[in-house]
Image: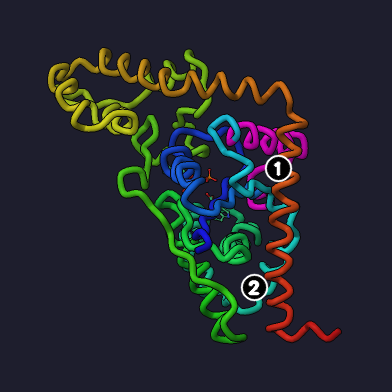
Amino acid sequence: MSKKILLSGIQPSGRPHIGNYFGMIKQLLGQQDEYEVYALIVDYHAMKSVQNPKEMRENIKNVVLDYLALGLDPKKVTFFKQSDVSEHTELCWIFDTITTMPYLMRAHAFKDAEAKNKEIDVGTFNYPMLMAADILLYSPDIIPVGADQKQHIEIARDTAEKFNRTFGETFKLPKDMIMKEVAVVPGTDGRKMSKSYNNTIPLFAEYEEIKKAVMSIVTDSGEGIPKNVYAIHNLLRSAKELDPIYKDKTGKYKELKELLIEDIEKFIAPLREKRKEFEKDIPKALAILKAGSEKAKKVASAKMAEVREKIGVQVY
Ligand code: AMP
Ligand code: TRP
């Protein structure tokens, strides 16, 4: 029996944070033995926010080092970069031709951008189609993601169904894998932890940075349990372990924050060390990505050959 397939992607748009880790990366890396895993760096998606070549190169390199430090085993996982596999943008175009504007106008990301009265670029509007291509080229069974990506997976399913209805059975319908407890990891201000809100605890933060971030966690002036501190702490320790501590230290916000700093440091310190090891040989790390892209390209080009046949452009 061949293994089921799991795929997920991350944008090289800045430093990953513990929300990315607990919401998605942990699920991806935790399944390296059970599933055939595809880990994708979506650099073309990141172009929405990164439009500086030096920064883009740095970000890509950093994600590679991050994943390797977190334990991605390149022998087990196909670790690759979207821009190396041109079939992604090719399939995106084909999906564009079977998708309507009103349908994409219902996407949350587009509606949020519209509500903020932003000048919306076509890439932001079309984002879910490129993501559908990322997914459907590899026929995955499940996609681990945070709750913010749920709608994008639904769009990928709808697009697969529409294509299959129009041109015959071609794409497998993927399912999301969203872990309830970590679907939305809160940031230091209590909102969703997000690179764009400045409320993150970076995954490879140095001690001083962890301290600063935790000390900035917003607490109310009440006497009870600091909700935001507890929520982040709960990522690292079970409620069973935490509840007696928080009960014992009711109202002692500073002490609780200090305890959280120590727990985050215990979690991050070994990761930071591992990352430093990988930093010593960046060409080797990048060669892993290149080899992964070559492997992915084979799968994607076979799927595209099938798509071209189905839509009738294959005449030779
Ligand atoms: P991004 O940084 O937007 O590329 O996100 C990478 C992955 O992390 C996606 O699967 C997101 O759903 C997930 N993610 C990002 N922020 C959070 C968060 N605060 N809580 C849970 N998952 C998150
Ligand atoms: N949209 C995802 C995010 O912002 C990134 C992404 C792009 C992705 N393509 C994907 C995630 C395919 C899973 C599968 O987090």
Q: Left or right? Give the position of 277 relative to 7.
A: right
- Within the magenta stretch, is there residue 55? yes
Residue drawn 71% across and 33% down?
A: 285
Relative to residue 110, is residue 182 depicted above or below? Answer: above
Among the two numbered marks 1 and 2 on one chain, the one whose residue lies closer to the N terminus: 2
Q: How crowded is mark 1: few (under 14 residues within 10 Å), some or many (20 or more)?
A: many
**Which x, y percent locates residue 255?**
26, 13
- Extent of the magenta region: 43-67
Residue drawn 52% across and 17% down?
A: 206
The quadrant where residue 193 appears: top left
Label 1 C-beta lies within 8 Å of the nearest ligand 2 atom: no
Looking at this view, name the residue that lies furthest to the right: 316
Q: Do the residues labelled 1 and 2 touch (CB within 8 Å)?
A: no
Secondary structure under the numbered disc 1 in the rendered image:
helix
**Which x, y percent locates residue 189?**
37, 32
Task: State the CA–CA distance, disc 1 to disc 2.
Answer: 29 Å
The quadrant where residue 288 appears: top right
- Magenta span: chief secondary structure: helix
Q: Can residue 189 be seen in this view?
A: yes
Nearest to the observer: residue 49 or residue 269: 269
The amino acid sitting under disc 1 is Leu
Q: Residues within 10 Å of mark 2 (few under 14, many from 20)?
A: some
Q: How many marks?
A: 2
The amino acid sitting under disc 2 is Asp
Label drawn at residue 96: 2
**Which x, y percent locates residue 89?**
71, 63
Q: Left or right? Give the position of 250 relative to 67.
A: left
